[in-house]
Image (tube, helix red, strand yellow):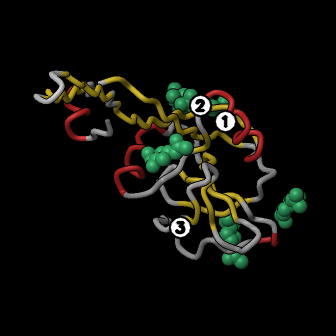
Amino acid sequence: MVFILCLTNLRLVVDAVCLFSLKNERLTCWVFFFFLVHQQYHFINKSLTWYEAQSFCRLKYTDLATINNMDDENRLINTLGSNVTSSWIGLYNGQTNRWLWSDGSGIASFTQWSPDEPNNSGGNESCGEMYDNGLWNDASCEFAMAYVCNQTALLPC
Ligand SMILES: *[C@@H]1O[C@H](CO)[C@@H](O)[C@H](O)[C@H]1NC(C)=O
Ligand SMILES: *[C@@H]1O[C@H](CO)[C@@H](O)[C@H](O)[C@H]1NC(C)=O
Ligand SMILES: *[C@@H]1O[C@H](CO)[C@@H](O)[C@H](O)[C@H]1NC(C)=O
Ligand SMILES: *[C@@H]1O[C@H](CO)[C@@H](O)[C@H](O)[C@H]1NC(C)=O
Ligand SMILES: *[C@@H]1O[C@H](CO)[C@@H](O)[C@H](O)[C@H]1NC(C)=O
C-alpha cells in the first residue's frame, strides 16, 4: 500500500548514486532519502469555536482542514460523521476580505460555497463551515461545532 502510494504520490525512496573516479581511484556516493507526503483528515465530533478547533488541530495534528480540489473535497466528505450537520474547516476571512486557509497556504482558489454564500449574515461571519452535503457556508467564528483537522505526515518509502 505504502509502496503503491509512493509510486503515485512520490515526493522523495532511499536512493544512492555512486561515481568512480579513474583519476584518483576514488568511489564517491551520494545517498538520498525519499519520503511520501501523506495527508489525512480527522473528523472530531466535539463542539468547539473555530479558534478553539484551530488550536486543537495545531496541537494534535497539523492544522484545520484545507481543501484544494475535488479529490480533497470528496475525501473530506467521507470523513464527516453521521448526524453532524456542520463542521469547521480551515477557512477564514482575512482582513483583506479574502477567504484564506488556516495552514498558511493562502487564498482559497478552489471553493464549494453553498448557493448565495458567503453572505456575511449579521456582519460577523468570518469563518468557514462545511455542511453535511459537502457545501460550504460562512458562519460566526463563535459558534461551537464539530471540526475536521488535517494531518501531514512524512512516511519513509
Ligand atoms: C456526534 O455527536 C452528536 C451529538 O453528541 C451525536 O448525535 C452524533 O451521533 C455523533 N456522531 C458521530 C459520528 O459520532
Ligand atoms: C445517528 O442518529 C440515529 C437516529 O437518532 C441513530 O440511530 C444512529 O446511531 C446515529 N449514528 C451515529 C453514528 O451516532
Ligand atoms: C445568509 O446565510 C445564512 C446561512 O449562513 C442564512 O441562514 C441566511 O438566511 C442568509 N441571509 C441572507 C440575507 O441571505
Ligand atoms: C454574530 O452574529 C450573530 C447573529 O447576528 C450573533 O448572534 C452573535 O452574537 C454575533 N457574534 C459576535 C461575536 O459578535
Ligand atoms: C492539508 O491538506 C491539503 C489537502 O490534502 C494539503 O494540500 C495541505 O498541504 C495540507 N496542509 C497542511 C498544513 O498539512
Q: Residues within 10 Å of mark 3 (few under 14, many from 20)?
A: some
Return the residue at label 2.
61
Measured Cα–Cα span from mark 1 to mark 2 = 6 Å
Residue 41: give its label.
Answer: none
Viewer-nearest residue: 43 or 131 = 43
Return the residue at label 1.
58
Disc 3 C-beta below 8 A from ligand 3? yes
Q: Residues within 10 Å of mark 1 (few under 14, many from 20)?
A: some
Viewer-nearest residue: 58 or 120 = 58
Measured Cα–Cα span from mark 1 to mark 3 = 27 Å
* Amino acid at circle 3: Ser
* Amino acid at circle 1: Arg
**Residue, x 72% and y 36% (percent of image)?**
47
Q: Secondary structure at mark 2?
A: loop
Locate residue 54 relative to residue 67 in the image: left or right: right
* Number of residue marks: 3
Residue 114: give its label.
Answer: 3
